[in-house]
Image: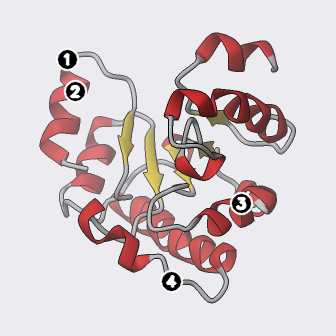
């Protein structure tokens, strides 16, 4: 989210930049990621957490997220991030209602079809059910199994061993 943090992390040994804003929160992020020449994850983002819930308004969530991610892809490429270093994330749980997240999951192949590796971070998220995040682990594992058959690049999870076991 912040170019200075990304730079410091890479200098300290990080090998990837995971930008939850897709380059929108810090105008220097895309140029910094291009300069550092490490893989860059551009997540779909509509705003900071304090305003996120007010931004979850979609006519067609899949089409709109695809369109907005395509704009971030174009911006990343224009900044000099190489196609081979660009990874996209549809941003489950970020300015999305539960039904929006499920719609994206059901059409995840559309995101894969953009031609970039796709990262999905659904682990223990509220839309999987229940108030206790740790109680959502079984649903996370089942979702990992489903997503692993869709052509995505990776899932971001908390319980690595349980999720790895279903791959």
Above-or-below relation of 89 to 142: below
Which residue is outermost to the bottom?
A: 59
The image quarter containing residue 75 is bottom left
3D distance between C-alphas at marks 2 and 1: 5 Å
- Residue at the image point whose x is 45% and y is 36% from the top: 39
What kind of element bears circle 2? helix
Q: Give the labeled residue for mark 3.
A: 102
3D distance between C-alphas at marks 2 and 3: 33 Å
Q: Are marks 2 and 3 in contact (CB under 8 Å)?
A: no
- Residue at the image point whose x is 39% and y is 71% from the top: 53
Identify the disc placed on residue 28.
none
Q: Give the labeled residue for mark 4.
A: 57
Q: Residues within 10 Å of mark 1 (few under 14, many from 20)?
A: few
What kind of element bears circle 4? loop
Q: Nearer the N terminus, badge 2 or badge 3? A: 2
- Badge count: 4
3D distance between C-alphas at marks 1 and 3: 37 Å
Q: Residues within 10 Å of mark 2 (few under 14, many from 20)?
A: some
Q: Is residue 90 left or right of residue 38?
A: right
Identify the disc placed on residue 9.
2
Q: Nearer the N terminus, badge 1 or badge 4? A: 1
What kind of element bears circle 1? loop
What kind of element bears circle 3? helix
Above-or-below relation of 107 to 2: below
Q: Give the labeled residue for mark 1.
A: 12
- Residue at the image point whose x is 64% and y is 44% from the top: 117
Q: Is residue 156 left or right of residue 145?
A: left
Q: Nearer the viewer, residue 91 or 7?
A: 91
């Amino acid at each position: 989210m912040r170019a200075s943090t990304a730079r410091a992390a890479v200098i300290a040994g990080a090998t990837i930049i995971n930008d939850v804003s897709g380059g929108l929160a810090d105008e220097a992020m895309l140029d910094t990621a291009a300069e550092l020449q490490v893989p860059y994850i551009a997540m779909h983002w509509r705003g900071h957490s304090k305003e996120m819930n007010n931004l979850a308004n979609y006519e067609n969530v899949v089409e709109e997220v695809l369109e907005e991610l395509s704009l971030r892809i174009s911006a990343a490429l224009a900044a000099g991030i190489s196609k081979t270093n660009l990874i996209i994330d549809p941003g489950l749980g970020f300015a999305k209602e539960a039904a929006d997240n499920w719609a994206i999951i059901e059409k995840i192949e559309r995101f894969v079809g953009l031609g970039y590796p796709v990262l999905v971070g659904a682990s223990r998220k509220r839309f999987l059910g229940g108030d206790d995040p740790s109680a959502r682990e079984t649903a996370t594992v089942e979702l990992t199994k489903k997503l692993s058959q869709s052509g995505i690049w990776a899932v971001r999870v908390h319980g690595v061993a349980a999720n790895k076991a279903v791959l």
